[in-house]
Amino acid sequence: MTTPGQTKGKNTQKTSKDRTAIRLLERISRMDHEHPNAFKIVNELHQRRGSPQLSYWPEWCYVPSLINPIDLPEDDQEELILLAAWRLGMGIYRFDPDLLAELWRTPVTGNIPSQILFRLPEWAVYIEAPPGNKIKGAFAYLNWSYHSEKPQIEVSFDYGRGTLSSLVIDLDGTLEEGVNGFIQITREAANIFNLNTGAGSAFSEERLRATSDHMFKELGPFLSCLLYLCSQNADYQPPSKPQPIMSKKGPKLFPAYKAKIWEVGARVGPQLRAAKARAEAETSGTEHQREGHTKRPHLRRAHWSTYWLGPRNGPEPQKPIARWIMPLLINIDPDEDQHLPGVIHPVEK
């Protein structure tokens, strides 16, 4: 059964020979080998959320990444928390290549409320990058900052081997504001860990700005994919978050028994290819003459649009809904556009 605004896609269960699944499972095995029982300790921390012995964190966060349960180096600590959350569902999101190409170049700018990302389908997700990209993919995880007491999204780039490279942005305004606030978050983290922030250091103002400019060129496309997974008209069958199972010691979350490939865009992808083929066919044919100007048929660029559900002055706050507006065919003959496939999305009320 699909949820409102989402169409059914395929979930490929056969992952035993899938390269991405093998690589990510090897990362989990390596962490488990180097730090035995670490995943068990993190899961126990999650089960104790809300107890007087632990600081507060919201229920949508599995475990805050700054919690260091077994005294690990900072990079290993963040990766442990991330992998502990991801292994509960082990979801790998594989986008149709044409949909991915369009999302890759759809900018995440303007007044897009960052709270839309609270609709991520799992505790943590993995987004595959296009083939040939130096980044193989990226994990994403909803985090809670004890220092700022703000929600965050942590995106960790996977280069195939070695330590993950992570970026964290606040989710208390628009996505664009969160991206622009990266320098402040990094500066605060450097102060917390007493790192050198002087001129020439890795955390100097100059190096931070250069690093953020470079990294956000890589972050933007992944944010666009994450936003798509949370959008109202996303074309995939989302999984359900795992629920605790009663054990001898009470309710307990268990990891997934294998990785799952969630195919995104099984219906939208063919629609995009048909639209592109039609635009190319029209362009190679007779030019359209309008008001004395030559206008070729073309595809208008995709973009994001946000809607608000609920009354402005109602008892409950309005709920933001994101929709990805796919490329539109411009200046084609409407009478010959009947063959393009359609995608039906139920409307959320």
Image: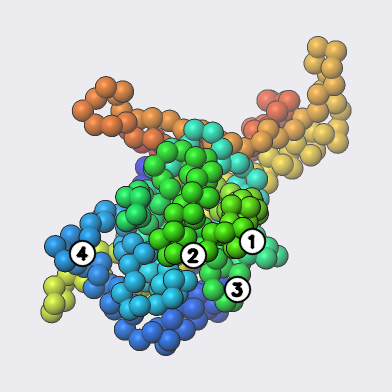
Q: Amino acid at mark 2?
A: Leu
Q: Compute the Cα span from label 4 to label 2.
A: 26 Å
- What residue sits right under mark 4 in the picture? 54
Kindly identify which numbered label has been placed on residue 260.
Answer: none
Q: Nearer the viewer, mark 1 or mark 3?
A: 1
Q: Earlier in the sequence, mark 4 or mark 3?
A: 4
Q: Amino acid at mark 1?
A: Gly
- Which residue is painted at 31% across and 84% down in the image? 37
Q: Is residue 236 visible?
A: no
Q: Could you classify mark 1 by the number of other residues whose Cα lies within 10 Å: few (under 14), some (14-19), or many (20 or more)?
A: few
Q: Nearer the viewer, mark 4 or mark 2?
A: 2
- What residue sits right under mark 1 in the picture? 200
Q: Earlier in the sequence, mark 4 or mark 1?
A: 4
Q: Secondary structure at mark 1?
A: loop
Q: Compute the Cα span from label 3 to label 2.
A: 28 Å
Q: Earlier in the sequence, mark 2 or mark 1?
A: 2
Q: Nearer the viewer, mark 4 or mark 3?
A: 4
Q: Amino acid at mark 4?
A: Leu
Q: Earlier in the sequence, mark 1 or mark 3?
A: 3
Q: Which quadrant would the C terminus be assigned to in this image?
A: top left
Query: Are dots 1 and 3 in contact, CB under 8 Å?
Result: no
